[in-house]
Amino acid sequence: MRKVLWALAHETGNIGSRLREALRHSNATQRSNTLLNFAERSLGRAKLLSLPSIVQVEVTNRCNLNCIFCSRHSHPLQLGDLPECLIPEISNFSARARETICFGYGEPLIGKTFRGLIRDTRSGRISFTTNGLALTPALISELLAEVSRPLYNITFSIDALDEATYLSIREHSNFERVWENLRGLAALKASRDLTLPEIWINFVAMRRNIEQLPGLLISAAEAGVSRILVFHLVVWDASYQAESLLGYPDLTKRIFDETRRIAGERGIRVDLPITISDGGSRTPDDPEAMPLPKCHQPWSYVYIRHDGEVHACCFSERLKMGDLKENRFDEIWNNAAYQNLRQTVNTSPPPDCLRCEMRFRYSRSPNERETYLKLTPRAK
């Protein structure tokens, strides 16, 4: 117990305001679980008393768009929706989580069980990411009336400032409708004097759109967006390899610096990754070499696929830990596969972990070509 208390004090001292924000909508059980989870991951425990503090559920992997960069083009999916019979089990273990994220490889709003999931989940708060096409003000009103927990944020996927560029990336979408729905959400919040849900934007940065990022930031701030998260393009097919920003570090740095300046002026939060470059593999004597950043996913997070498979990470298909159709979550959470991963992920990481774009979001990866040009086929 003394070790747990020390680790808890160490962790909470490090994360400060972020922890307070994360726990704002949690009840006593969720707060206790989150704090214990921080302590157990700090101690590197393989077998946990805590449950994950963040649960991500892929409601469906079906989608109503055809985005050029989506991995489904080179790695075909077996399409489906989360079975309704799994919702009670997810609701049960999510009761100790501080957040449930309803999103995966598809558009959640077309998922057959999306509304049932957000109605029955019992975490501290709920969030989801959408392409925005179906998120009309009328639907938002219905969701706010049905949702069981605070709807913390809704993230719109918008990758351009102008319609032509946007449609060249997100085929079959409707630029004007997406912005109308975003502004409609902001207007509904204003009319009801609501602070939640926050409106965020995800932006996938590539050569054709990166110079539009500062302008998009201005338009987003004016529309009521509070945060923009920027992600480097990951190339799954050689046909759009030229869009990667690996070859444009100077341009990327200039745009990112301008974006930070505008964000400060406009009062909008922006979360930017590092600038990447096609500089080859990192070697131990590289002056920029740093220890591998720690991964906390096997302790604090779980990804539930639409078919019930339980994964330690949404970026690696090899990290399957179990299946909710076969076992209860509490049987999976501390099984041999999970305990082994917790013992190795930060000492002898599996191959996929060494080219994970999220693990190396804020620091250089050992090989940035392998991290952002993933042309080797993978199972899906």
Image: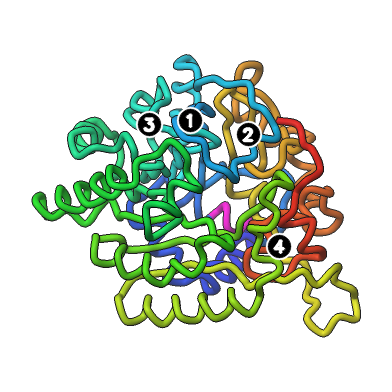
According to the picture, the residue beneath numbered tag 3 turns out to be 109
Residue 112 pos. (x, y %) = 41, 20
Task: Name the N-terminal-most of marks 3 and 2.
Answer: 2
Label drawn at residue 294: 4
- In this rendering, position of residue 22 left or right of residue 265: right
Q: Residue at x 76, y 31 (%)?
A: 379
Residue 335, compared with residue 156, is above or below; it is above
According to the picture, the residue beneath numbered tag 2 turns out to be 72
Residue 308 pos. (x, y %) = 59, 23
Residue 232, compared with residue 9, is above or below; it is above
Check disc 4 and report its element: helix, strand or loop.
loop
Q: Residue at x 75, y 49 (%)?
A: 374
- In this rendering, position of residue 60 left or right of residue 145: right
Task: Name the N-terminal-most of marks 4 and 2.
Answer: 2
Quarter occupied by residue 282:
bottom right
Q: What stretch is highlighted in magenta?
A: 36-40
Q: Residue at x 63, y 21 (%)?
A: 78
Task: Name the N-terminal-most of marks 3 and 1.
Answer: 1
